[in-house]
Amino acid sequence: MKFIHTADIHWGMNPDSDKPWSRDRAQAIKDTFSEVIRQAKARDIDCLFIAGDLFHRQPLLRDLKELNYLFSTIPGVQVVIIAGNHDRIRPSSAIMSFHWCPNVTWLMDEALSSVYFKDLNTEVHGFSYHTAEITEPRLNAVRAPEDDRIHILLAHGGDASHLPLDRRLLSASGFSYVALGHIHKPEIAPDDSYAYPGSLEPLDKTETGLHGILVGEVSPSSRQVTSLEFVPLAQAQYIPLVVHVTPATTNSELNARITEVIQKRGPEHIYRFRIRGMRDPDIVFDLEALSHRMQVIEVIDESEPQYDFSQLFADHPSDMIGFYIRALQKEEMSQVEKKALYYGIDALLRTTDERS
């Protein structure tokens, strides 16, 4: 039995909503999910497991129609879905009354339920969220039935507020495979007994690294996973980078260097830069124009002005600058203390009417 496992698609979300590229990211979520459907067809997959948060919020009818059309293009693939905390089942949910195509099964019950596919000798178990949180470890006592079927478990959780999980118990639960969702970073058990695919597309600056789907196969005889592969599909990555500066680095040079890095790594990605090193005290790094031209979500300036404190003290032994240096400077200084010294001196040097 060959399968694709995905989760945390968050269809309908607008990542980086305050940025110019937000609409492109929203469309990327939809386009990449369409690619999942194409992968299912191209790889001759038997089952597509969606382990929660297919939608970012309660879906509109047009969203259901769009997805139903995509599922209808793979009629030979059994699609099994559970709702996560974001798209949890509510009495008014359009999902409840929507007529899905024949190959789609929603395990909508709040209690554990299952669906059996005779031709695949595969039974898929799972339950959906009906509340925003599930704080009980509801799966700790769950065990797969002891029969000759392939048993798959779908679950959404893994933190204290959303279905706490004991990974050791999951591995020993007897299921051929446990398809998990909610954690947005890919994770595969050492014995392939459970896995998180992570979010399909990265959804914010904390979700660095590759994102995609899991493609696996379960042996019909041993009923164990024989292969499990992470396949990157996301159109973009959030990439954190550090740029080092010196007192000789100018604002124009820094902009040029960052532009070159982005062009080399790919302008389709989204970048977060940290500026580190010593800079000329007269230089102020301004990358706002660059952030508008390219997908730079954040610039954190951790550079420090290279002041000659000995010379400054010699030049200002009895005014506020000298007093400030004497009060704050010491041999061993924390980063906070250094910043207090640098920022204070910078402010005093730029102010002429208070130096007395």
Image (cartoon, grey):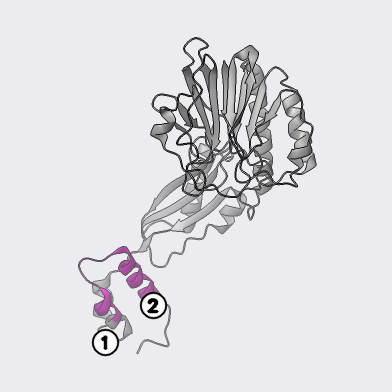
Residue 100 coordinates in the image, percent (x, y): 76, 30
The secondary element bearing badge 1 is classed as loop
Left or right of 47 on screen, residue 189: left
Question: Residue 68 versus residue 97: which sits nearer the camera?
Answer: 97
Left or right of 19 on screen, residue 180: left
In the figure, 235 relative to 59: above or below?
above
The residue under label 2 is 349
Residue at far bottom of view:
356
Split into 4 quadrants, where in the image is the C terminus? bottom left
* Amino acid type indicated by mark 2: Leu
* Amino acid type indicated by mark 1: Ser
Question: Residue 327 versus residue 129: which sits nearer the camera?
Answer: 129
- Magenta stretch: give its range: 324-346
| Number of numbered labels in the structure image | 2
Left or right of 135 on screen, residue 56: right
- Which quadrant of the structure image shows residue 156? top right
The residue under label 1 is 318
Residue 98 coordinates in the image, percent (x, y): 78, 36
Residue found 72% across the figure and 23% down from its top: 103
Residue found 42% across the figure and 84% down from its top: 352
Residue 59 coordinates in the image, percent (x, y): 73, 43
Question: Residue 62 versus residue 111: which sits nearer the camera?
Answer: 111
Marks 1 and 2, the one that precedes in the sequence: 1
| Magenta highlight on residue 280 | no
Residue found 55% across the figure and 50% down from its top: 296
Query: Callout 1 environment at 10 Å: few (<14), some (14 to 19), or many (20+)?
Result: few
Query: Callout 2 environment at 10 Å: few (<14), some (14 to 19), or many (20+)?
Result: some
Q: Is residue 214 visible?
A: no
The secondary element bearing badge 2 is classed as helix
Left or right of 307 on screen, residue 262: right
Split into 4 quadrants, where in the image is the N terminus? top right
Distance from Cα at disc 1 to Cα at disc 2: 15 Å
